[in-house]
Amino acid sequence: MHTTPRNIHALVRILKAPTDPPSADGPLKIDIANDAWLDASFGAVKKAEVLVEWLLGALGRDGKRDDKASGNGPLSNPKYWSLLQQTLSSSASSVRPLKTWLIPLLHRTNLAGMVKELITFSHVHDVDLSEVYVPARAVLAILWPLAEKRVGMDSLIECFAAVLGVCGPWNDGLAWICTMVVASYRELLGTFGNKKKLYTTFLSIHMPHWIRTLSSSMGSQFLNTQSSREDPLSKTPKQLHDTIYRAGIDTLFSVEGLKQPLDTFFDALSRAGADYGFNILPGLFSARLSAVNRFRNTLFSSSSNSTSSALAIREAMRTDAMQFWESCWGVLLSDALTTESGVQRTDAWAALVGMLAVIESERLYTPSSTIRTGDQNTAVHRDTESTLISARGLALDAVESAGQAWNSSDMPTVTLVVDALDMLTRIDYELVGDELHRILRAVVNLPRPLSLPATDAVQRLLSDLLEYHAKTRTVHAYILTLLSALSSFSLPKSVSSQSLPLPAHDVVFSPLSSHLSSLTRTLRVALTPTQSAELGPAVMEELRRVRKAYAIERGSDQPSGKRRKTFIEEGIPAEEHIDVSGARGSKCHSLAAAFSLVARVSGTVLASLPSHAYVHDAQHSGIVCDEVGKLGWDIVWESIRHEQGEPQEVAPQNQDDSKVKKRKKRKRGGKQQDPDSDDRLGTDEVVASAALRFLYDVRARFVRIESSPMPVTLGQSDVLGGDEIEELLRVVRDESTTAELTLEIIRALFAQVSQTRGFQHAQASTIIKTSIDILSRNFSPQSRWCGSSAALTQENLGVALLYVLVDRWLGVMDVVAPEEVLQKFASLLLSIPLEQPFEVTDEFDRQPSSHRDISPYNILLLALRNAQFWELRNMRSAFLTFALKQTNPLSSLSPPSASTGNSVPDKFELVRASKVYALLMYVPHEYFTRTSRAELVKRAASGDVAICSVLWGVNDGGEVDSPQLGDGGCAMDMDKEGSSEVQTFRELCVRYLTIFRAFLYRMGQFTNGLDYTTSRAYVEHLLQSPPSSAMSYALTKETLNLVSFQLSTLLRVQNPDAVTEAIDTLDHLLAAEPLADLLSHGPRKCEFIRSVAFRLIECLREHHTPESLATVIVSALKTLYEYFAPVLLLEEEELKTYDAFALSEHVEARCYALSFARWLGIDVTGRVVPIGTKLTNMVMRSALQSRSPLVGVKYVKTCPGVLALLFEELRCLPDISNLEYLETIAALYSIYGTEMEVRNALDIQVVKAARELSIDHFAHLLSVIAEGIEDPRLPVGRCKSLIHLSTMLLHDTPQGTLKVVQTFVTRCLAAFTGRPHLYDGPSELKEHYLELIAKHCSDRPAAVRSVDLGSIWSLLSKILSGTANHDTATSFSTFHCIVSIADSLVRLRRDVVIHTLPHLAFVLHRLLLITKRGRPQLGAKQSKLVAGTLPSWVSPSQPLGVAEIRAFSRLLTALTVKTVPPTYTTRQHTAVAAETQKAESLAKPFAKHVGHVLLAYIDCMNDSLCVLTPEMRRELEPGLFSLCEMLGEYNRDALMVSSLDSGGKTIMKSLWREYEKQRYVGKG
């Protein structure tokens, strides 16, 4: 049996034995060492040193063994590393210093070799080293800092190579070890001499592994995707990835590396493999540019002239960078991006986009010529330009091939290709300007729907193109090019129009949708008058050209019967005939889609032109209105009649119906006889819809600009006759008409009715009736519409039509529609379920479509929340009439009465009638007529009783004799009550019962009373609440509101009958025994009745006095109080036996009983034992002793009730110790007020009790709070609670406490200013007391005294002073509080601020200084200098933003605002002062101090380490201009002479120049 060695010599002999284990059957050496270490009796002094020496030797020898790859040696054994960790940790705390004996030992140990082998073991797949890396990390954290100084570069290179060879999976220990090694390599690299050799070695050996390690992570940065084949654990951790990346960059782009030829670098890069090299190219490009910039003076020679030298160096850097780009393009990118192979390299396109982004951001490209003039400069520039033009050509080829294939799998590549074109546009528009038409045509032809990234990319490209043309005032040329590109739209020959996921002419799912809005904004600001006059006719001409092309193709696309017969007789195969016909049909569809797109853009353009672009005759330059109307309607009539196969004249209005039917039959027969035309159906309808939409857009422009009362039309062609309207109505009635055309025709007809004074239109009622009929026939509450007219079908036509009518034409319908039509429309609108439909995932972008689609639910809310809807008298009357009709079944029920019972009504009728009240909740109560309001209230009360009877009739098992499906599709199967997707009948009843009671409460508040003759019976009914299983929180809340309102109504009415009813109600409430379960310690059954009683006490306390009520009612109330009296007799010991919930109920009941006694004037002194302080001590002890969060404390829900009880006992029991109670109140709030959830409940009690406190109690409570705030031993959380409590108390103070408040505020200000634990406290504490001061200055400016101003300015100065320690996150609320304090004082107390203007100037000076932010990429010392000027609550990494600058600018502006300061004196003196005072500002007295504030701005602008962003300067301008106005020219000159250097003078001149531009000088 093995025994542990008893002395150090024996241990050394065993560990140095030549074999392991030392004896044949004995334990291993590591086990012996472990036993020796754990043996407490083995107390050798150098035991740890001996074990460390042996362990390091064993681990070092393991790296030299031949079988180390097997993973069986000490390096892969966690026992060695764990024992080494224990011994080193013990030695670190020993008496002998660790460095004394460990450093010599490390000199004899190859620690770098051990680390290398440890990292290499991660390649062995059969060995699990997860338990090794954890102790190894702890060991190396001690050893590596001591040994890294003696590790050479060769060893570190080998370790770095081992790190690059790690394939994963990664864990925290291995990642930390690798990061440590690479960081040491980077540190040594900075002082290494032979960097050229290192550069060569890295290129030839390590660069492929380095690129392979970084490629996956860097690729995902550009593609924003992760390969499905990639294991997340195999990805390099971010910190290690950044370290490896920086190490490689430092190696490659040192000074010696930058001096080497680029050919060597790119040869190595190309050998690294095309599979990995692309992803890292943008990073290499950016890193090399930064390195060249850092070493620019060493790499490029400079001349003596500093200005020319800087320019020459800048040009040399730009040339060097573009040479790197050209090499990248020629060696790697050019071949990878070619489209000849048909396979697109996504990573190559990502690399191209990344490199172009670097060129654009660094402004590296300077055009060698204006490409159109051909003035060339140097060959280098020509080569750069040619590479960029080649990239443009490849990108265009890729986009065009994607448009021809319509393959959704190419979307990631399409996104990058479009981004490449966008980058080229940003670099220099001239690179893409010559190919603008081709670019737009390629983008238009992209397959739709595009993915979200692709859509964003196209929108960025179009926005940049439009922005350039807006800047150069050539928007008109861009629009004509866009129209020309849209007219070239074509579908691929291999794609059928019926197989498209979206119609080809759709715009909503196209990037054009958002581009049109940008185009509209640009047209209104970027067009010259001449361009406006010329653009309109050019747009009209383009529209005519596209229409003509479609008409020609449509005519050639209709082969006659003879031509079809010729095909067969000539023996042309059927397949070829189908191919020819299909190609013609595809072209016809393409031209129809092109016309639709051109018409949409043309309508937008013409609608955005200014009014002077429209003329009344062709003699002037511009658009003739008649030509627009004539062109549009010509296209409409031609397309409609051609689609119907009719001659192109207007059909007679009195045409025989039989002829119409024959023509429809002939039309249908013709379509059936021509099977080849299936793919060409609907093109005429698409064109007609587009033309109608075009007319509607342009007509809307005239509605906006026309101010005359004359009808707005586009000439005579836009005024339809009776025959034309009848023809359009026939098209609409035809069920074979497409939904898109139906919607556009109805919209056009409504426009005709509206613009031609619809109430005089002969066929207006027919138009509206037909539209409502179509709406009823095609409407379904489950339908949805995406908003695109091109995506309309018969299923969602009803939703689209309803949306158009509700959104635009309600006024027309109200004036013109007959009553029965309005009734039909109202019934359809009210049939929509008022419930949010389930979200349906959109198949295009996998997003919930409810975020974009229009549902009937959205339309219903749009109507109910629209003020215009309720202002329409006829529409409102139809709505209320239909509501009364739907709720008619409730009128047959008997009203609530004590003697009459209700039978259970039919459940279908009950649900159908009840759901109307959900809609009535949206009706403004002013729009109910008196009759309808009374009837609806009566029916709501009857429905309430009926639903309660149904709920009482449902047994506990949930069985009820009800249909399986209710109205509106709501399931009523009670066996499915547990399902989350099925709404049970009981849930419906509870929901409608809640709505009934909310409606009754709302109507009662509006009428300020209900019928007292039925109030008693209804209150008795309300007290008989539904079963507890059916009571929800919302139902309980509404019931309590309604009961309290009914009781208040009974008590308010001065009538003998009402008094009798009130007494009976109180007797009924007393008979319900609200405290029975509380006094008997039984199960909780009277919670609702008890809540009603509490509400009654609140109502009495807030709205009534005993003198205002009848004597008999007061007697009944005293009888009710006697029932509450036993609650006041409970002792403290008895209450301690209750659980937390029961205790909370007893405390609440006791509090209300005391309040009731006080209201009745009953003296309870001597009969009630005060227990508030004892309960509070128990509650506070529970919180202080608990280690769990405060919200989990046992008595957390009891705390608000205990606080209310303290206030009540303080008011009702005069014999108690007031000081003790007040201290208890402050202590309770300070402990439980640290949690937001508990604090809100406590605040409610404080607000209720604050105004009822006496002056002495209020003063003592504030004094106790002040003592707590001043105590430095009080925890920060409790101090914050006390400050918040004082804020709540000062918000609504008792009368006569002004001096008390002033004394308290002065004391607090002295504490905030003089106590280090307050002014140097954490930011959250500062926020609380600054909020207290801000609210005091804004809410109670009269309480601000001049003695307080010094403390306020001193406190703000301390808070704004700079410091070396800063929080991790900036406290923006602190800044806003400081600005609010200063602003309130400037606006409301100018009379006291005027004596402290130097202090105000200093605060403004500091506020302006802390708004600056450090420049990016500052060094450590520079960042420390900038941070030292900032206060502790401003984090240098999170500077103040635009919102803070805007608030500060408003403060500066307030200095010049003239106001009459309020006078806080007696009424007589106030009247006199109001007559004598005049409006003044601080501008004149503050003028002497303005220069000090402006100096802060100049210092910020002149500081080389800081910056004020353009957005911040723009927001600051109004305040700076106010300062300039106060300063004046004389003080300006004095400031420039005495305080400013040359840079400051330049900034001041620039600021004054801007001020002069906007200053009003009185000349107009």
Image (tube, helix red, strand yellow):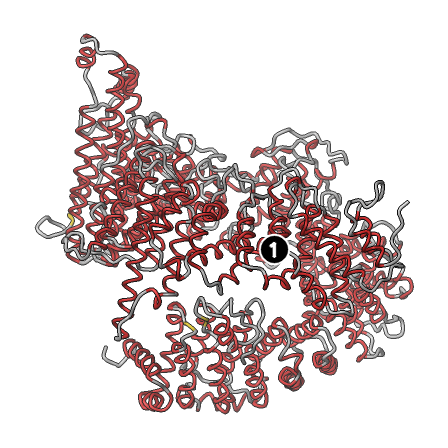
Quadrant of the rendering where the C terminus is positioned? bottom left
Residue furthest front as drawn = 18
Q: Is residue 1113 visible?
A: no
- The spot of residue 813 in percent (x, y) is 37, 43
**Residue displayed at 26% across by 36% down:** 489
- 594 to 261, vertically: above or below: above
Given residues 1217 and 391, the one toward you in this image is 391
Q: Is residue 249 left or right of residue 662?
A: right
Q: Is residue 1019 left or right of residue 867?
A: right
- The spot of residue 882 in percent (x, y) is 50, 40
Q: Is residue 1334 visible?
A: yes
Total numbered labels placed on residues in the image = 1
- 447 to 246, vertically: above or below: above
Dot 1 lies on which element?
helix
Q: Is residue 1059 left or right of residue 875?
A: right
Q: Quadrant of residue 437?
A: top left
Q: Residues within 10 Å of mark 1 (few under 14, many from 20)?
A: many
- 1289 to 1070, vertically: above or below: below
- The spot of residue 930 in percent (x, y) is 53, 52
Quadrant of the rendering where the N terminus is positioned? top right
Given residues 292 and 1082, the one toward you in this image is 292
Given residues 526 and 186, the one toward you in this image is 186
Residue type at tag 1:
Ala
- The spot of residue 212 in percent (x, y) is 48, 45
**Residue displayed at 34% across by 64% down:** 299
Q: Quadrant of residue 1355?
A: bottom right
Residue furthest left as drawn = 619
Query: Which residue is disc 1 drawn over?
Result: 112
**Residue displayed at 22% across by 23% down:** 645
